[in-house]
Image: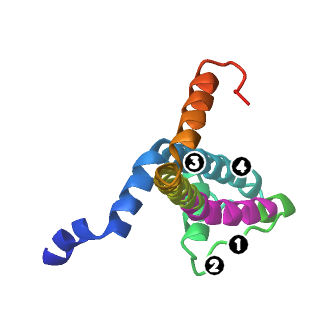
Amino acid sequence: MRLVKASRYLSGVANFGKAIQAKKRQIILSIIAICVMIVICSVLMYSFESKEQPEVFNNGFSGIYYSFQVLMGGDGEIEPVTAIGQGLATLMLLLGGCMFGVPVAIVSTGFEDMIAEQAGEEEETVDVYELLKQYDSLTEEQKKHFRAYASADDAGGMSPQ
C-alpha cells in the first residue's frame, strides 16, 4: 500500500494517468472495434471450417474459442485446414497484436501531446522573461519607440519608423 501511495508523488505516474484519461475514448473505441473484428473472424472461421472439421467446429462458440486460443498463444489443438480458415487465423493473429499495440500507440501519442504542451508553456515563459530583460536594458528613447511600435501593432496600424 505504501508503494501505491508513493506513486502519487511521481510525475511519470501522474503523466501516465493523464495520458490515459485524455485518450480514454480512443482507447475504448479501438478495443471495441478490434474485438468486433475478432468475433466476426471467429464466426467466419466457424462457417468455413465446420464443413471440413465438424467435430472441432461444431457450433459458433468453437470459432470464438479458437480465436481466444490464437490470441492467448494456445497449444495448437485446433488447426484450420481450409485456405480461407488459415487466412482468417492469420488475420486473427494480426488483430490480436493490434489489440495491445493500438492502445499503446494511443497512450504514447497522449504522452507526446503532453510533452509538447509542457514545452510550449516553458518556451512562452522563457520568451517573456527574455523580452523583459531586453526591455530593461533599453534607453528611454528606445523604450519610447518600442511602446509606440507596440501600441500601433495592437491597433492594427502601421508601425512607426
**Residue 76, label in figure:** 2
**Residue in the foreground of this view, choosing between 31 and 103:** 103
**Residue in the foreground of this view, choosing between 44 and 112:** 112
Q: CA distance from mark 1 to mark 3?
A: 28 Å
The magenta stretch spans residue 14:
no
**Residue 44, label in figure:** 4
Residue drawn 59% across and 28% down?
A: 148
Residue 159: x percent and y percent? 70, 27
Residue drawn 49% across and 46% down?
A: 28
Q: CA distance from mark 3 to mark 4?
A: 21 Å
Q: Quadrant of residue 69?
A: bottom right
Q: Are marks 2 and 1 in contact (CB under 8 Å)?
A: yes
**Residue 133, label in figure:** none
**Residue 79, label in figure:** 1
Kind of residue at disc 4: Leu
The answer to whether residue 113 is left or right of residue 15 is: right
